[in-house]
Image (tube, rainbow, N blue to C red):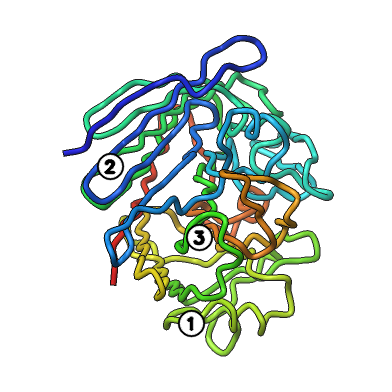
Amino acid sequence: MTSVTRDVFGNLPGGEMVERFLLESNFVKAEIISFGCIINRLETKDKHGNFTDIVLGFDSLEGYLNKHPYFGAVVGRVANRIANGKFSIDGKDYQLPINNGPNSIHGGLKGFDKVLWKPKEIENGVEFSYTSADGEEGYPGELKVQVTYTLVGSELTINYKARTTKTTPINLTNHSYFNLAGQGSEDIYDHEITIDAQDYLPVDGTMIPTGEVLPVQGTCFDLRMPVDLGSQIAKLKENGFDHNFCLSSEKQQYCTRVHHKPSGRVLTVRTTQPGVQFYTANFLDGSLRGKGGAVYPKHSAFCLETQAWPDAINKPQFPSVLLHPGEEYDQTTWFDFSVQ
């Protein structure tokens, strides 16, 4: 049985209260706040039965109100990058805020990671709701969104639902930064990863997919068998991984397994989404002070952002990200924690 408790995490500058929810089972302790639906703390057991916090973040609300790289947050209305912040729907052109080089990323200047969600306790978890106004951050249609976190045993489930009044692109994900050795650990080089993907998306110099879908076989992106992250990152011409891996079209599929041998921790991910953006925190630089005063340098965490393919709104050959009135967006990702 999962216990769900709530308290106050802090107050926004306007006085609005940010609540914190602690979901606790015998295996996992997950702390989520109503600002940005942020997973603020995630403690799991190692092979000796000791709990350690394995996600990056901040001890207080102030850290999340200042500029940070989306630690633990739900990002949207469209996660990842949209080329030049432009797209067209039914012949009408839309321009989004530019906030990542020449592109728009993670919903714009004030995406879902920077808004206060309305929480409701449910069995084994918490449900957050938010209504994104028509035209918010340049996107068409009023979008009513629900994000639900539930914890049962060793598995944390995130479900995303949404409905719109106008046809709009949508792509929701959680942007947690994991380090299975514990947040504040120096790097992730001693982690072993497997991603069950036959293909990946190559990107241009601004990290926008070129439109090609290439096989991983014979490349550094072939992670179908377990590889050590340190040696694999060293083989890349890039600073690290920040690429979409293309998953099968099954409705519920295993996609990723990460094993940290020293602690014994294992993270296994399943999802209904068509892709997973594997990111190795290439842009962390040690300038942020995190929980307990920890410093977060480059490659000190990894992200597994289960989602639609980046810039799909501008690439008709990619799986569609359009949500139409009368339809329901409904995607789920499962994070299972174990030891080996």
User: Residue 64 vs residue 8: left or right?
Assistant: right
Label 1: few (<14), some or many (≥20) within 10 Å?
Answer: some
Q: Residue type at mark 3: give it.
A: Asn
Cα separation between marks 3 and 1 = 16 Å
340 w.r.t. 83: above or below? below
Q: Residue type at mark 2: give it.
A: Leu
Residue carrying label 2: 151
| Label disc, if present, on residue 179 of the rendered structure | 3
- Determine the residue positioned at 70% across, 28% down: 137
* Residue 316 horizontal/vertical position (percent): 61, 55
Residue 289: which quarter of the image? Answer: top right
Residue 10: which quarter of the image? Answer: top right
| Label disc, if present, on residue 227 of the rendered structure | 1
Q: Are marks 3 and 1 in contact (CB under 8 Å)?
A: no
| Element at label 1 | strand
Outermost residue to the top: 15
| Element at label 2 | strand
* Residue 182 horizontal/vertical position (percent): 48, 58
Residue placed most toward the observer, 60 or 38? 60
Task: Work out whether mark 1 precedes mark 2 in sequence or the reverse, and give the earlier one.
Answer: 2
| Element at label 3 | loop
Task: Work out whether mark 3 precedes mark 2 in sequence or the reverse, and give the earlier one.
Answer: 2
